[in-house]
Amino acid sequence: MTGILIVVGLLVAVFVGFNIGGSSTGVAFGPAVGSRIVRKVTAGALFTVFAFLGAWTIGRNVIATMSRQIVDAAAFTPAASVGVLFFTGLALLISNLYGVPASTSMTAVGAIVGLGLATGTLNAELMFTILSAWIVAPLIALSMGAFIGRYLYPYLDAKLAFGRLTDPLIAIDTRGTIPRLSVNENVAPRDIAGSALVVAIACYMGFSAGASNAANAIAPLVGNGAIDPSPAILLAVGAISLGGFTIARRTLTTVGDDVTDLPILAALIVSSVGATIITVLSWLGIPASLAVSTTSCIIGLGWGRASRARTLAEIATPSPPGEPGLGVTTGALTAPPTEGAADVAASPTVGELAEGETPEPDTLQASPDRVPRVGEENPEELSAESLFDPAATARIVALWVITPTISVVGAYLLFSLLA
């Protein structure tokens, strides 16, 4: 019976890893796909490689935390391991079916918390530390995004002014016997440099996702000794890769197209902030959500950009009745500042140039000296395009709450009945 449960546990771990790949690939490479730099297949391949590197190195710290520190390793009986993995996978599957990049770490930890509460083995002190990190990390991402959007983004945009692509910069040509990479030749050198940075940082995010999320699929099995960490990592990354090439197509569309239409510079900022926060937490052995940190930075960046239309004194002063405040705009965005924000200054679209035409530097780059100061920008210009869709963002936040809740409640009820 124990052997059968271990086999079932391995199968469920593959199921969980599959759903993790579907969620995390969208978070890591959504900006790169949305910016039309790489295709979805290329994103899946790059994500697999760097997720493995992250899981094999600092991901071992997170595996140790989740396999024997949140609850005692003895609590991970074969039956308990199957139950934890089942509820983790079920909650993630629900989120992926809605095309939402779920918080995999919160969902997996939630299932372990349900086990710990039911068996009385929960390490309350460690969980307080993890919960604190879950609160502080998105606040840091939000604050950094807001600061950059309000005070630095216009100057960075005037200095760099990357264009947007209508066709992928990098694609995998599968027409021959051996697949090979192909590069879009109708792209300005400046945009090639910017696009290369976006891909590099997306790979960095893949590293962070592997470091943080591989443990979510295999920690219970490592905890009960059913499998050693090294082969467990190979199993997890294989399953994650499968999800990255299949179900991730929906989350790539959600992050890349529905949530935001990111200019290259904004994608660089968002990806860098999110990946760095999660890499640091993973190094500390704390499971945390790349999806939450990344989206928090998107929200902060958009709010910061929109808030440039008013000074801090004006923001702090309530608007007279009948007059719109900062949270009410006249463009495509009408959500309050905590739920939505105007798009960062839109970069030129490379696809709008005549075929074979090379953009002149002056058409892509404004002088930093001509960037309007805070309080001088036109609110209507700032709200011409929304940085993210408030409705899509609300759907994502709702699923972030629902999936861990399903995981905690389901695991607690199951293990309470079995106790």
Image: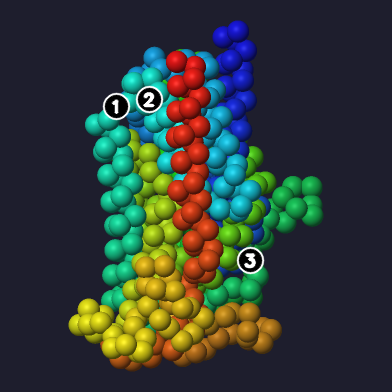
The residue depicted at 54 percent of the width and 23 percent of the height is 82
The residue depicted at 60 percent of the width and 8 percent of the height is 1
Residue 55 appears in the picture as rendered: no
Where's residue 293, x and y in %?
Answer: 39, 54
Identify residue type, mark 3.
Pro
Q: Which mark is residue 168?
A: 3
Q: Number of numbered discs present?
A: 3
Given residues 282 and 332, the one toward you in this image is 332
Given residues 150 and 155, the one toward you in this image is 150
- The image shows residue 214, relative to residue 333, as above or below, that is above
| Residue under numbered circle 1 | 123
Q: Which mark is residue 140?
A: none
Q: Residue furthest top?
A: 1
Q: Residues within 10 Å of mark 3 (few under 14, many from 20)?
A: some
Label 2, secondary structure: give it.
helix
Where's residue 234, x and y in %?
Answer: 54, 29
Q: Residues within 10 Å of mark 1 (few under 14, many from 20)?
A: some
Going by the image, does 32 lie left or right of 314? right
Distance between the alpha carbons at the discs numbered 1 and 3 = 48 Å
Q: Name the front one of labels 2 and 3.
A: 2
| Residue under numbered circle 2 | 116
